[in-house]
Image (cartoon, rainbow, N blue to C red):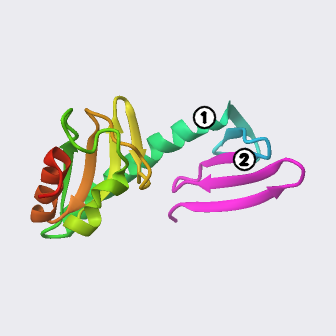
Amino acid sequence: MGVRVEQVDLPGIGVRHDVVTEDGRQVSVVAHRSGERTLGFTDADDPDACTASVSLTEEEAAAVADVLGAAVVLSRLSELRDQAAGLFTEQIQVPTGSPYVGRPLSATQARTRTGASVVALLRDDDVIASPGPDVVFAAGDTIVAVGTRSGLDALAQIVAAGPS
């Protein structure tokens, strides 16, 4: 059956997205016009009966999305690594002395210089999945990247000491 996502407009309220899982369970996300999000869980035997709901602020919803997004990204990277010979994933530490501490990802020109793609950034207990070019590096961040062995080695060198 697979996963199915349905969208329902809720006039005056916002939009509801229903995710129907492979086992028939339904998880609903109501995006209110106010920015609030509500997660709803239905009874497996009665999809019209909500068994529990949780209201989330925009910040809380973003945190849940980051956690779910990062888990999916890392899982797919693992699957991709198994499928693609010559493609690797690597975690690269941003050292205190890196010339990119306090500078955005775009300053590295990582993809242009190395062919490697930065797919996530790990900072303390947070995961920034698919970081944009404006994400600023901090000492101790961990970059999750995908590329060839030589591309990842070049990226690690650039992050540590700048371009050669």
Magenta stretch bounds: 1-30
Q: Residue furthest right?
A: 12
Judge left or right: residue 53 versus residue 111: right
Residue name at image x 28 percent, y 65 percent = 111
Mark nearer the N terminus (1 vs 2): 2
- Number of numbered markers: 2
Residue name at image x 63 percent, y 45 percent = 44
Distance of label 1 from label 2 (alpha carbons) = 13 Å
Q: Secondary structure at mark 1?
A: helix
Vertical comparison of 30 with 114: above or below: above
Residue name at image x 35 percent, y 49 percent = 120
Label 1 packing within 10 angstroms: few (<14), some (14-19), many (20+): few
Q: Secondary structure at mark 2?
A: strand
In magenta segment, residue 2 = yes
Judge left or right: residue 9 versus residue 117: right
Residue name at image x 72 percent, y 46 percent = 30
Q: Which residue is identified by label 2?
A: 31
Percent across and percent down for residue 89 are 20, 55
Tell which of 42 and 110 is nearer to you: 110
Percent across and percent down for residue 29 are 67, 46
Task: Report the amino acid beneath label 2.
Answer: Ala
Labelled disc at residue 39: none
Percent across and percent down for residue 31 are 72, 47
Q: Which residue is identified by label 1?
A: 59
Tell which of 64 and 148 is nearer to you: 148
Percent across and percent down for residue 19 are 61, 54
| Quadrant of the image occupied by residue 146 | bottom left
